[in-house]
Amino acid sequence: MAALPTLCLLLAVSRCIPSTSCALSDADDALHRRAVAAPAAARHLTAEVLSAQDAALLRDLRPASRSSLPGWLDLHEQLADEVAAAAVDGCMEAYRGTIVGEPADMFTASKAAWAQRATAQRALLLGISGDQAMHLLWRLQNGEGPSKLKPKAITLMIGTNDAFHLTRVLPDTQEAGHVTAAAVMQCIRELQRQAPQGGKGADGLVIWLTLPGIIARFDIVGCLPFALAARIVVLGLLPLQPPHMRRLPFGAAVAVANKEVQHAVQRQASDKLVFKDCSTPFVNASGEVRLDLMPDGVHPEAAGARILLKCLLDAIHLLLLSLCNNPRSMRAPHPRLLAAGAALLVFTAFVRLRTGRDAGSSWARMPEVVQPAPRADAGWAEFQSKLVEEVTAAKAKQGMDIIAYGDSITEAFRGSGYGHQTPKYKSNKATWRRRMGKRRALLLGISGDQTMHLLWRLQNGEGPAGLNPTSITLMIGTNDVLHLNVLDPDDEEHIIRSVVSKVQLCVRELQRQAPQASIIMLGLLPLQPVKPGQVPKRPLAGQLAAINQQLRDFAEQQDVAFQDCGGRFLHKNGTLNASLMPDGVHPVRAGSELLLECMLEAVD
């Protein structure tokens, strides 16, 4: 996929806690042995301070879950699902706006900062509040690791909770720092084991592209190396000093951990690993934590969240920039390879312009959407706000018969496209009104939406919580298929896996908000677009069949209904009936009648 740099940001704490290190040298192994031995001071641990599980973690540095904490396993499973759905991965939980999966007002500004700065970067947020390094290590080994994601950059932020607990229970802050550093190093080794290794440097050609609308969106420069290993950005721990615990020397333990981790990184002398200290803005001239940036002495909030995120993204950008500009990080490409690369760029630009995938084509400009996000398109926010108002008004009715979620195929039953009444959908609107009769129903579809846009909407005002619906229909994924077939048409396996995983996330969100409702998943309809440049000229039937079958299997596992209406739109020879879907995507006239009839069969 010739798109934006892929970011793999991994964290596990209540704040943006940092962490670090890499494959260990002999000197690092000695440090590790000393740190593991240190928790013999575990005799100082007390049940009042740490649980038995925490004590075992400190003694043995073994991976462990926090399954006894309510909500922890549920959030881990959600994050693992997001990894399975994505081509990249992400950062700490504070930037999700949650604490152990539950919305938290204190992190609203952090979530907004992430949405503003990082949504275009194809990144996921994989952090869980309160996690220590061994909890993250367990998560990496149980579904949240980067082994299948092929990221260009990984950031690791972990260790704050280790330093916090260890400082409280060990009499020697030096040992607390040693153990924290050793635990972080194990996470680094696991990341290095799973992350793409590439060759010695970037074999062959590295090209910087500044062609807005052709390769990069919003003039963001993309570095496209061949056979590139993942780069790891390690961030030092931020200052740690809760105001109500000033007597405990957390800062000393943090300083030891940062120093030892930084030295371990420097000993690697590798262009695949860097250490970044973002702590300077968070302390004042006297070395005390700035409570205007970290009100609780632990978590950056509001301005602090923006400062930290900028530091993180700048570190990644500079790392990729140095890779592309540093001759030591790559082998000199053969002249013929350079010529081939130049020819490839010219050919790519020509094809995009001839097929409509140019600066005016949203399909060409948009990177894959890998996490819940709103759309920046003009008018989208206004229409979405209107739908939220409809949901709010419906809650006063104390109960809905049907809520239909989806994209343009669903919105067409409103007679509109993107919120504007559209003549070609007039018959769809009439069909909906006639067949619904006196049913209390809501139509919540927006043209062009992909699954992650819908998931964002469910989490931001359009969800079924409080509506008490009897039935919910979900038809989403068509735009994901069209978009992914433009971005990476040769990787059908990823397209299928991505669409299925993201639809599953939407289903789980609906189940979470409306556990009493009957949920009906509608299979994707046949696709044969006639709009130039929308998809490559190849059949999509195989992809759609695979996606629908996997969704059917998932529905059976989740005790959710699945209804495949696609066969009704095909001739006996398997070709699309153009009279039902003239543009190859949207049912109209008799086609809308067939679709609604099929949907109501599952509802009734």
Image (cartoon, rainbow, N blue to C red):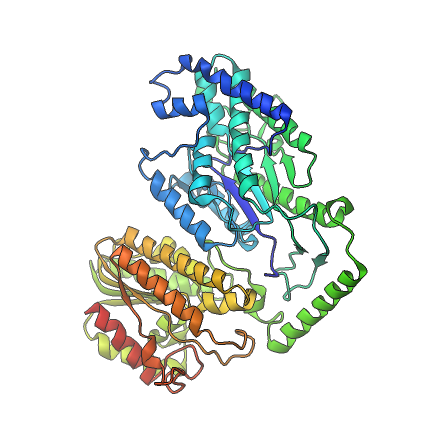
Q: Can you give x and y, in whole percent of width and height, for residue 449 in the image? A: 44, 65
Tell me if residue 277 comes above or below residue 417 in the rendering.
above
The residue nearer to you, when weighing 64 against 275, is 64
Using the rendered image of the protein, determine whether residue 200 is visible from the camera's viewpoint. yes
Q: Is residue 479 above or below residue 192?
A: below
What's the residue at 51%, 28% (across, down)?
A: 183
Tell me if 594 is positioned left or right of 577 in this view.
Answer: left
Whether residue 418 appears in this view of the structure is no
Residue name at image x 72 percent, y 50 percent: 324
Name the image quarter holding residue 104.
top left
* Residue placed most toward the observer, 176 or 108: 176
| Residue 556 horizontal/vertical position (percent) | 27, 59
Write the residue at 42% across / 46% down: 79
Q: x, y percentage for residue 597? A: 25, 77
527 above or below 28?
Answer: below
- Please state, as top left, top right, bottom left or bottom right, where the N terminus lies in the image: bottom right
Tally the marks: 0
Q: Residue at x 29, y 80 (%)?
A: 594
Q: Quadrant of the C terminus?
A: bottom left
Q: Nearer the viewer, residue 427 or 268?
A: 268
| Position of residue 442 in the picture relative to residue 119 (left or right) | left
* Spot occupied by residue 208 in the image (x, y as percentages of width and height): 71, 57
**416 or 65: nearer the eye?**
65
Decide if residue 577 is on the left or right side of residue 321: left
Q: Is residue 253 above or below residue 417?
A: above
Residue occupying the far bottom of the picture: 579
